[in-house]
Image (cartoon, grey):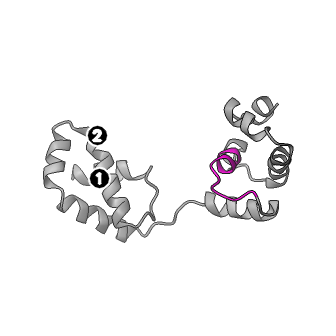
Amino acid sequence: RYVRDYGIKTDDAFFLTRSVSQSAYFEKIITLLNDKSITPQTVANVMINKKISTDIAVSTFISQLREMSKPIQVDESALSGAIEKVLSQSAAQITQYKAGKVGLMGFFVGQVMKEMKGKVDPKTLPSIIEKAINV
């Protein structure tokens, strides 16, 4: 039923339905959530990976889930500065990247994340870094 009605992966549905209390907790969250941007699969992932404790009230879980799901606000000037700093210290890697070693993008993303202390969405970085490299 979880797979069919909520679009949950089979393995995740199995995990969520192993205990009656966990299943009831999940269903209560889904019923009360009323937020189309947070899918049942997201709720399942958060519960399974214990990103938020399930030992708290459902309303508290939902508010923490909403907070966790908010997009990260990024200081654009700080991000530009971090990218410039990383690229200025990575001349050899830039040369290798331009020569076709595209796996180095992960290195650049990691270094920018380190500079920004994790306060940027790593999914958005590759395109921004790519533009900065090719300027």
Q: Which residue is mark 2?
A: 103
Looking at this view, name the residue that lies furthest to the front: 19
Q: Which of 113/19 is in front?
A: 19
Element type at mark 1:
helix
| Label located before the other in sequence (1 or 2) | 2
Residue type beneath disc 1: Phe
Residue 113 placement, left or right of 23: left
Q: Which of 133/3 is in front?
A: 3
Residue 46 among magenta residues: yes
Does 107 sit above or below residue 101? below
Element type at mark 2:
helix
Q: Which residues are magenta?
A: 43-54
Residue type beneath disc 2: Gly
Based on the displayed image, in which of its 4 quarters is residue 66 positioned?
A: bottom right
Which class describes the residues within 10 Å of circle 2: few (<14), some (14-19), or many (20+)?
Answer: few
- Rounded to the nearest whole Å, what is the CA distance between mark 1 and mark 2? 10 Å
